[in-house]
Image (tube, rainbow, N blue to C red):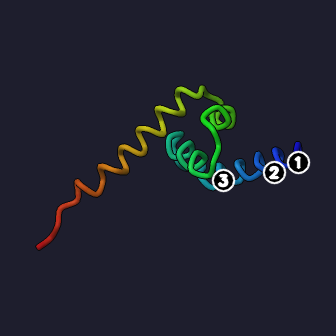
Amino acid sequence: MENNKKIENLLALILLNDLKDQGIGEKANYLNIVGFSHAEIAQFLGTTPAVIKQSIYIVRKTQKEKPSKQKVRG
C-alpha cells in the first residue's frame, strides 16, 4: 500500500512539473480532476484545503464564463 502512495506522489509531482507555469488554481484543478482530495493537493502545494477549494471554484467558474463571452460572427 505504501508503494501505491509513493507512485501517486511521483505522478502528482510530474503533473505539477508540467504545470510549472500555471497558477495555483490551475494546478489544483488538474490534481482534483485526476482524483486528489483538497487536503492532498494542499499538501503538495504548501497551502490549506480551504485555499485549494476556493482556487478550484474560481478556475471552474472562469472556465464556464469564457464561452459565453465570445461573440458569434455572422
Look at the numbered discs 1 and 2 and tell me whether their residues touch, using CB distance below 8 Å: yes
The residue pinned by badge 3 equals 15
Kindly state the secondary structure of the residue where label 1 is placed.
helix
Residue 15: x percent and y percent? 66, 53
Q: Amino acid under label 2?
A: Ile
Q: Is residue 54 above or below residue 65?
A: above
Label for residue 3? 1
Q: Does dot 3 land on a helix, a strand or a loop?
A: helix
* Labels in figure, total: 3
Q: Is residue 54 left or right of residue 40?
A: left
Estimate the x, y position of residue 64 in percent, counting from the top left: 34, 50
Q: Is residue 45 above or below residue 21?
A: above
Q: Could you tell me which quadrant the N terminus lies in?
A: top right
Q: Tell me, yes or no, whether the two marked residues, 2 and 3, touch with CB atoms within 8 Å.
A: no
Q: What amino acid is found at the position of numbered circle 1 in the picture?
A: Asn
- State which quadrant residue 59 falls in: top left
Location of mark 2 (residue) = 7
Q: Is residue 56 left or right of residue 34?
A: left
Q: Residue furthest left?
A: 74
- The residue located at (61%, 47%) in the rendering is 31
Q: Amino acid at mark 3?
A: Leu
Q: Which mark is residue 58?
A: none
